[in-house]
Amino acid sequence: MGRGKIVIRRIDNSTSRQVTFSKRRNGLLKKAKELAILCDAEVGVMIFSSTGKLYDFASTSMKSVIDRYNKSKEEHHQLGSSASEIKFWQREAAMLRQQLHNLQESHRKMMGEELSGLTVKELRNLENQLEISLHGVRMKKDQLLMDEIQELNRKGNLIHQENMELYKKVNLICQENMELKKKVYGTKDENETKRNSVLTNGLVIGEDLQVPVNLQLSQPENQNYKAPSGTTKLGYDYDHFADRPH
């Protein structure tokens, strides 16, 4: 008569539970050892009892098995994340291709191409869209022109102000030149007055006179000169002296 099927659940009796734990633990460790030998597998088993006691088995070393397990888990996680990332980007690329196709088709319709399959209602909607677009383009153009006009007016006002400032500076320089001219010519007139001044007893030449003065004495004519009577004759008689024998 065969054994009945055992219900897999926690054994309430502590003695039966401890006996079952010992039997099944030994069997699990035995099966792990056999698996490592028969299949040349790297096996590691760790068992903690209800009291916290550790039972383990490793075909090589438990640290080597754990390190290999962690490395394998990380690689599997990376592969899983890479695969999911690849699927995500594939979906994104498909969506972008569909959007590009729709935009290209809309652009061709806007350019008046491939209109054969459109109904009257669709053509009317397309016409309305074109009118709205044209209105927006014209408004943008007018706005740009107004902005340029305002900028040119602003620059014109700045240039006008600069010209006024320059005009004021030029007038100020002209006034300064006129004052300097008056001072220079006034000093010159005073110098000329000093040079032309004449005193009763003779000529007076100022210290600031720069033009040289040439003086000449005119010789009286001998034939028209007569000595006045009653005057004393001084010096030698030239003719008498000439007639005397040497």
Image (cartoon, helix red, strand yellow):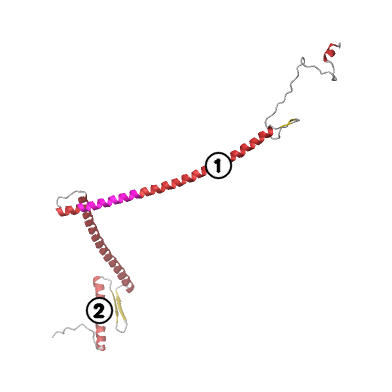
Residue 35 visible in the displayed image: yes
On screen, residue 135 above or below 177: below
Q: Residue furthest front?
A: 229
Task: Give the residue pinned by disc 1.
Answer: 175
Q: Where is residue 5? Give x, y as percent.
A: 16, 83
Q: Quadrant of residue 231?
A: top right
Q: Quadrant of residue 232?
A: top right
| Residue displayed at 82% across by 13% down | 239
Task: Give the residue pinned by disc 2.
Answer: 28
Q: Earlier in the sequence, mark 2 or mark 1?
A: 2
Q: Main secondary structure of the magenta part?
A: helix
- Tell me if residue 128 is in the magenta stretch: yes
* Location of the C terminus (image quadrant): top right
Secondary structure at badge 2 equals: helix
Q: Where is residue 226? Give x, y as percent.
A: 80, 16
How far apart in space, not on screen, are marks 2 and 1 (Cα)? 119 Å
| Residue displayed at 61% across by 36% down | 185
* Location of the N terminus (image quadrant): bottom left
Q: Nearer the viewer, residue 231 or 171?
A: 231
Residue 105 visible in the displayed image: no
On screen, residue 85 above or below 186: below
Q: Quadrant of residue 31?
A: bottom left
On screen, residue 224 above or below 84: above
User: Across the whole image, how many numbered discs are drawn on residues?
Assistant: 2
Q: Nearer the viewer, residue 156 or 48?
A: 156
Q: Nearer the viewer, residue 114 or 121?
A: 121
Secondary structure at badge 1 equals: helix
Q: Where is residue 106? Give x, y as percent.
A: 21, 53
Q: Nearer the viewer, residue 80 or 96?
A: 96
Q: Is residue 62 left or right of residue 195?
A: left
Q: Amino acid at mark 1?
A: Gln
Q: Which region of the structure is painted magenta?
A: 127-146
